[in-house]
Amino acid sequence: MAMNLGPGDGLGPNSDPEPILEINTTPLIDVMLVLLVMLIITIPIQLHSTDLNLPTGKPPVNAVPPEVVKIDIDPANVVYWQGVALPDRAALEDKLKAAAAQDVPPEIHIRPDAKSRYDTFAAVMVSAQKLGLRKLGVVGGEQFQ
């Protein structure tokens, strides 16, 4: 890389070699302008707000707690309804149909064992959703194998 020493080559007796110390600031200005444009574009996005009409007061308290149905799945993939073993999937669907037909459908809490198969759990969830039960939850947070 060479440095420009200005007019003359600096080899003569009266020549005084002075380097030109100019920096090309064009790339720095380009970067600054890009950052400025990005700032201008993003500021309106951060300042947008939406007015919400939130309800005031306390929500009504349910006088009757919701019915909870517990469905357990053991390591052998046997499904239990409130602690009673069900012989097959048809029996589970009959119980779920009866629960869905109630005036106030119950909450369904599914508690699979960590060693149970995922497809058994998925079959229970699909059956419950297919029959119209919407308050479903998994209790325990165990991982499936």
Image: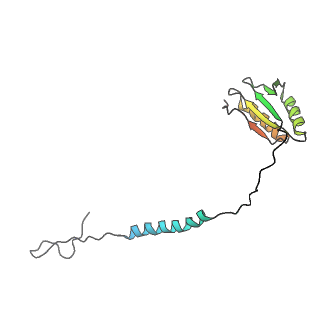
Image quadrant in which the N terminus is located: bottom left
User: Residue 118: which quarter of the image?
Assistant: top right
Residue lying furthest left: 13
Out of 129 and 7, give the one closest to the viewer.
129
Is residue 115 found left or right of 29 in the rendered image?
A: right
Q: Is residue 29 left or right of residue 23?
A: right
Q: Which of 7 and 136 is in front in this view?
A: 136
Closer-to-camera residue (20/44)? 44
Q: Is residue 113 left or right of residue 71?
A: left
Colour setting? rainbow
Height in image: 82 above or below 52?
Answer: above
Q: Quadrant of the C terminus?
A: top right
Residue 72 position, x and y percent, is 77, 28
Vertical placement of residue 19 versus 137, above or below: below
**Which x, y percent locates residue 144?**
67, 31
**Displayed quadrant of residue 31:** bottom left
For image coordinates 53% across by 68% down, the residue present is 40
